Each structure stands twice: as C-alpha cells, then as structure tokens.
Image: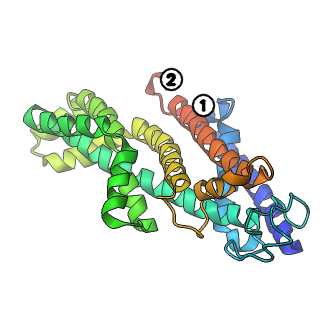
Amino acid sequence: MTFGSWLALVVAIVLSAEVVRWLRHRALRHERWRRFFRHPTAAWGCGILTFLIIVAIAAPLVAPLDPIVQPDPVRLKNHAPSLTFLMGTDVFSRDVWSRFAYGARVSLGIGALGALIAVSLGSCVGAVAGYYRRWVDAILMRGVDIGLALPRIFIVLMAVALWDRLSFAWLTLVIGLTSWFATSRLVRAEVLALRERDFVVAARALGVPSSRVIFGHVLPNAAAPIIVSAALSVGNVLLLEASLSFLGIGVAPPRPSWGNMIADGAVTIYTAPWTTLFAGLAISLVVMSLNAVADGLRDALDPRQDPA
C-alpha cells in the first residue's frame, strides 16, 4: 500500500470513532437515544458500520490499486498479507484490499437499496391491508403467504433464466421485490392496533382522506418496528446478494463484491485463506453489527420504557 492509502485508512478509522463519539454525545439530550447507547453492543455496531461505509465511499483513496488489474499473475499470485498488500493478493494477483474496498460499495449498496425497496413496499402493503381489512386484507395477505412460501433464491434464479445476466440495478430491484413479505406482516399487525386509536378515529370523523390518514397519521406512528425491520433487512439482503454472487448469478465478475470474492478464493481456501477470510469476515461483521443496532433501536423506540 502507498503512504496515501495508509493515511486514508487511518483517517477512516479515526473518523468512524469520532462519528460514534459525536452520536453518543448528542444522545445525552434524549432519553430514547441514551437507551440506545446503553445497549452493550450498539456503539460497537455503529462504529463498525460507519467504518465500512467510509471505506466504501472513499474506496479510490484507501485502495492502492485498481480492483480489476492483474499486476503480475505469475510472481504475485496468492501473495500473503504484508505491508505492501494489506490483505494479500488473490489467484489472479489482484490486490484483495482494493477489491475489498470497492466490493464494499457494491455489497453495502445492494444491501441498503434492496432493503429500502423491500421496507417501502412492505410498509405500504401492510398499512393498506391493516387499515382497510376485509377483502383487501384477505387478498393482500394471501399474496404475502404465497411470497413467503416461495424460496427467494428460486425466484431470483427464474429472473436470471429469463434475463440472462442481471445488471446492478436489476439485481437490486429483484432482491428488493422478493424481500418485503415479512415486513408487510409486521406493519399490518401494527396498523391493526393503531387504526382504532383515538387520533385515527378523529381523523376519519373529520373526513380526512384515507391515503392521508395512512401515510400522515398511521405509518409515522408505526415507525419504530419499521426502522428495526429496515436494519435487519439490510443484513438479510446482503447475505442473499453474497449467496447469489458466490453461485455466479449475482454481481458479474470482474466487478468485485464480497460474495464473488469468496467464490474466487474458494479453490485456494486451504493454500491462501486470506482470499476468502476478509470478505467473509466483513459480511459476518456487517450482519452482527446490524443485529446489534436493531436490538439497540428496539430498546430506544420501545414506548413502554418512555417516562409517563
């Protein structure tokens, strides 16, 4: 690694620590966010996620080499981690750290965008089903039951068979459109409880349109479970993308993602374990950090713990 890459990496570590410190300081003003940071692993989860997001955004600065370039396929093949190659090189002599940084952009981008699509669609369907009930609820929930019964990877395989190789945008869209079913059930249950509250009954009595009641009154008061579901959905989408890329039907090589990095290094896992170790560790850390953040958010947004 060059001096500039080392400097950018150190800055990323310091900046992520400062972001968490600033968030903790701001949390002292609100009881809910004090509860969040009292969770034993929430701060660590925020720190890890912040660091990986900064690395993804600043990939051109922290990565010393182009993630696709093969400098010397003979002499630099499966080079062990060193000061020159922080995470070693892979079977094609590509710098693993550079691919790790650029792969974070792809994997985290698909995870965030796919979860955004899934949570948005699931929240809308769940809110409409819970608010209108009767035949609307029956039709929508039977559709959700069918979606939950079908394995998501089977649906994605059908999409790949129909459209050959999916682009980044289409892969994100397909994953998002097949990941909203559980969220819709969660939101529906919350809306069923909220629709009988006094403020919703009063809004209906005043003649407020149903769409405004749903999106202006009901969904904002169901934000807590939606936010927690969103945090968990990012990890689920990330794991699905990694699985698809490992199978060769996700992100197309040579564009790096953590999933196809593991696939590329699978053949040398015993002789060069670093080619798969760091990408697999990153996926595990992201999923565990998101679970920790979701647990902290659940504590922070629990209305039963608010002072009377």
Front-most of residues 255 and 223: 255
Where's residue 25, x and y in %?
A: 70, 44
At x 49%, y 43%, the residue is: 236
- Which is nearer the N-term, disc 1 or disc 2? 1
Q: Which residue is mark 2?
A: 305
Is residue 201 or residue 219 the one in the foreground? 219
User: Foreground residue, 129 or 80?
Assistant: 80
Image quarter where the N terminus lies is: bottom right
User: Label 1 is placed on what type of residue?
Assistant: Arg
Above or below, 76 against 145 in this view is below
Per the image, label 1 sits on a secondary structure element best described as helix
User: Which quadrant of the figure has residue 98?
Assistant: bottom right
Judged left or right of residue 94, residue 283 is: left
The residue pinned by badge 1 equals 35
Tell me if label 1 and label 2 are in contact, CB under 8 Å. Answer: yes
Determine whether the residue tagged by mark 2 lies in a helix, strand or loop: helix
- The label shown at residue 209 is none
Q: Residue at x 8, y 35 (%)?
A: 135
Residue 251 percent coordinates (x, y): 51, 63
* Mark 1: few/some/many CA within 10 Å (<14, 14-19, 20+): many
